[in-house]
Amino acid sequence: MAAETPARRGRLNGRTWTLVALLAALTAVVVWQFAARELSGSTDYDTMAQKLLKLGPKLIAITMGGEGCLMARAEKISHVPSFKVNVVDTTGAGDAFMGGLSYALLQGSGDNLSKCEGWDDERVGRFANACAALCCTKVGARAMSRLPEVNALIGGR
């Protein structure tokens, strides 16, 4: 697997780690589609997610730009479509997605993100996609939306 090459090594807390070792220690991993392709050696999204899940995380989210995102756990893979909006500027869309994903994962999960007993993965992905889509309708990296705007976009689907 590509992740085990020397270029994938780094230092953390005075120790050398491979990316694979770090992934094994994480509960949730969010990767861009091209990084998922490089790490997994696959071009199929489901296969990418399955290979990344085998490295240890409980949740894999793959961002796919205008195609939406993929949310994957060992028991289920969900393809969550993007929202169709009038795109003005994509700067900050990834940050908006991450903020939306973080917020959504914390809804009802308490201290146990590995179960995420609040929202199901489709709802989490839909919320994160909505945050990213709304960011794209404005100019600049600070074009984040407020919760009522996000809920309005989701409700209008």
Image: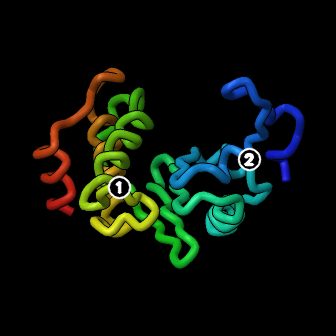
Q: Amino acid at mark 2?
A: Ala
Could you tell me if residue 75 is visible in this image? yes
Residue at screen point 68% across, 28% down: 12
Foreground tag (1 vs 2): 1
Q: Nearer the viewer, residue 17 or 146?
A: 17
Q: Is residue 45 left or right of residue 115?
A: right
Whichever of labels 1 and 2 marks the residue nearer the N terminus, that label is 2
Q: Quadrant of the C terminus?
A: bottom left
Q: Which residue is mark 1?
A: 111
Residue at screen point 48% across, 62% down: 71
> Up-down: is 96 above or below 91?
below
Q: Nearer the viewer, residue 113 or 92?
A: 113
SS for dot 1: loop
Residue 118 in picture, x, y percent from top left:
28, 66
Residue 38 in picture, x, y percent from top left:
75, 47
Could you tell me if residue 122 is visible in this image? no
Residue at screen point 25% across, 61% down: 108
Residue 153 in picture, x, y percent from top left:
19, 52
The image's mark for residue 21 is 2
Task: Please say which color scheme the image uses.
Answer: rainbow
Residue at screen point 29% across, 47% down: 103
Q: Amino acid at mark 1?
A: Asp
Q: Residues within 10 Å of mark 2 (few under 14, many from 20)?
A: some
> Up-down: is 146 above or below 65?
above
Q: Is residue 30 left or right of residue 121?
A: right
Residue extending furthest toward the front: 14
> Up-down: is 66 above or below 94?
below
